Each structure stands twice: as structure tokens, then as C-alpha cells.
Image (cartoon, helix red, strand yellow):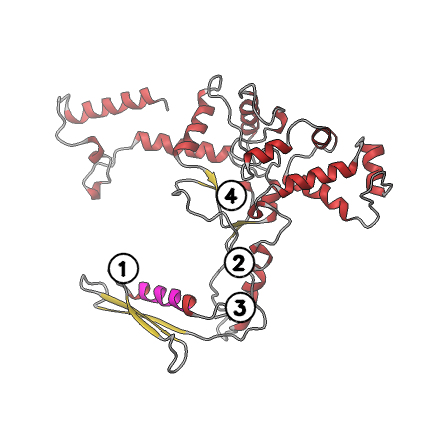
Amino acid sequence: MPKPVIQRLSKLTRKYLWNDKHSPPVHFAQLLLPVEAGGLGLLDLTTRNDTIDVVWLKEYLNFSEERPMWAYVADDLFARNTPAQCSPADPELRINMFLQHWRPLRKGLPKELLAIIDTAKNTGLRLEGRAFTRDILRAMPMWDHAQAEKTLIRRLGSRSAATACLKDVHRLRTVGDFEALEAEVSDPAHSRLGGCRCDRCTYLTSELGCTDPQRCYERATQFLDALPPKWDPRGEHPCDYEDAAHTAAAELFPSDDGTPVIFDRRVTTDGTLTNAFRVFEPSPSVPGTLPDMATHDGHPLEAVATDGSCTNNGHRDARAGAGVFFAPHSARNRSVHLPESLDQTNQAGEAVASLLASRWGSPSAPL
């Protein structure tokens, strides 16, 4: 809804409510509150408009099989409405401005697409997460990758015979495409010395038209090496350990009453690229490095008793505490009062006790 329409409707509402009074006795924002909060529950047109814009942005960033057709049209309009010296130079390699470094020109874009850009800026849209599945990492566009150092990734993508071959002959677009090509080097029959006649190189030269497969393998590796470890699918990631650790934890604590409830320590974002985006988050809120989620086999299980309690729970003078017990006479046994900055409840005490146990427990032994 255009802003002039919102302003006009709000003005008509005020005139109706206050019978054309020059100075309304109650601020309009108060009237938007629910009735139980002292308002009239009027529809907040501005917030409704902003919400609709966020929904449109979400639909544009839908990278599943159900992605709407208009989003592909928007991709093309964004990719072709750029500065003359935009990188990547080929519009076909400008996959999505939120997944790459490049940005379109505002002039020449329809207002609906400008709203997508403005909404992304106003909501702080960005790629963020502690870790991602390899499916997400491989779906990222390799050219002008948003998480790679801009100067380096653009230098690798500058005009050259290898770059042209990767783009036009091999038709590489995503990180997964580059990873698959690089993996060809591991073929035992392949020779790195040039003139290789292994089956794969023969196919690439005779059928695909690649003039120098080894050169393309090496350039693909250089592209992948430009990615931070968090965004490189070739290295170790938390998803390599999380599922196994979760299953092992459940087996450690068998229960006659059914499957025990195990704390879910998994931090990996799964699904599609859509799930890698965040809005309304303070910046920066997530480290750029991967957490160490590997389990340490061979260490004995360490049992820790934790508890939280609260006197006068639910009252203003409530006081909560937390306790941790490792073993009789252990120097790590602790009891603490919760600081006043925290909620003074039983639940808060129990949460703090669990936190203290993880901090004071052995870093190499499962708790």
C-alpha cells in the first residue's frame, strides 16, 4: 500500500474518531493498542504494510522447488540493472545480490523491487548461522561469493582462459559445481603433468571442448580455497559429529519409561539457502568461525548433580540460587546466588546450575 494512501486513511480515521477536533485528546499510537491495554485495537496500517513487505522478501528468497516464477524475473531485472563496471561482468553470473557482493542500481527498477531492497536493509537481512549443512554450502553461487574476500574472489573471476572455460564450457555456477570438478583430480588415473588421457580428461576435451582440464582443475581449487572454512564444504563441519553424538547420548541414558529427553546440542542450519538468512538480528551476533562440536571418545563419563531453588518463588522478594555437585570434598562443588539481573525463579536457578556444570566440568570428558 503506497504511503500517501496510508497517510490519507489514518487522517480519515482521526477525523472520524475526534469529530474533526484540531487537537485529538489521545495520541493516535495509543489507539492502536489492544482494548485490554487501553487502546481501541485499530489496525496499524504502517506495521501491516511493513509486514507485507517482509513476506514479499521472504518469498523472493525462497530457493526451494516451490520458488515463485516472479522471483526469477526479479533476479533477471536485478542482474541487468547494474553499473557499467559491475562484477561479475556477465549478467548470467549475477545469481542473487543477497548471496553475492554485487548490488543493482536503484534507478530503473520498479517500485516493487525497490521495496525488496529497502526491506532487506531495514530488517538487517544477512546470511548468518553457527554452521550450515553441506547442501546449503554447495548451493551458494561461487562467482562473487558473498562470504569470500571481495578483492580475491573478483580477481579469480577476472577475464582469463581458465575463467572463460569454467564459465562457458564447464558451466560452473555454484560452490558444489566447483567442488565436483576439483574432485576429478583425485582420480588415480589422472596425470597432473598435462596431456592426460584418463577417461575424465578425455571426455572433457573431446566431448565438452575443454582445452586444458588440469588448468581448470587448478582454477576451481583456487576458487574453493578463497572461501572461509565456515563456507567451504570440503573441510570438517559440526554436522559431521552432531547426529552421532546425539544418538550416543541417548544410548548412555536408557530409560524404562521410554526414550530420554536429550539436550539437543546441534547448531547446524539445514534445509535450503532460505534458512541461512536472518532478519532483525543485532550485528554481529554470530562468530565467523565454526564451533568445535567433535566428541572426545575414550574419556570416562563424568556425572554431575545440578539443581536450582528459590525462596518465595513468584513473589517480589524471591531469591534464587544454583548448586553443582561433582564429588564429595571436590573443590568444584559450588553454590551461588543468582545475580539480581536474572529472573529469581526455580527455572532460572536450574538453568544457571547447568551452565556452571558445563563450565567447571572437564573439557575432555562427556558430562
Name the residue that disc number 4 marks: 276
Within 10 Å of disc 2 (Cα), the crowding (few <14, some 14-19, many 20+) is: few
The secondary element bearing badge 4 is classed as helix
Give the residue drawn at x 62%, y 51%: 235
Q: Is residue 100 left or right of residue 181?
A: left
Q: Is residue 349 above or below residue 149?
A: below
Separation of residues labelled 2 and 3 (CA atoms): 20 Å
Return the residue found at the far top: 108
Q: Is residue 356 magenta?
A: yes
Q: Nearer the viewer, residue 99 or 273?
A: 99
Q: Of tags 3 and 1, which is closer to the observer?
A: 1
Q: Residue at x 39, y 40 (%)?
A: 280
> Residue 286 magenta-drawn?
no
Whichever of labels 3 and 1 marks the residue nearer the N terminus, that label is 3
Callout 4 amino acid: Ala
| Residue at x-position 50% and y-position 54% | 267
Crowdedness near tag 4: few (<14), some (14–19) or many (≥20) residues, C-alpha within 10 Å: some
Q: Which residue is mark 3?
A: 250
* Disc on res. 292: 2
Q: Secondary structure at mark 1?
A: loop
Q: Check the picture and name the quadrant holding the N terminus.
A: top left
Q: Quadrant of residue 118?
A: top left
Q: Earlier in the sequence, mark 2 or mark 1?
A: 2
Dot in front, 2 or 3: 2
As drawn, 362 above or below 224: below
Amino acid type at mark 1: Asp
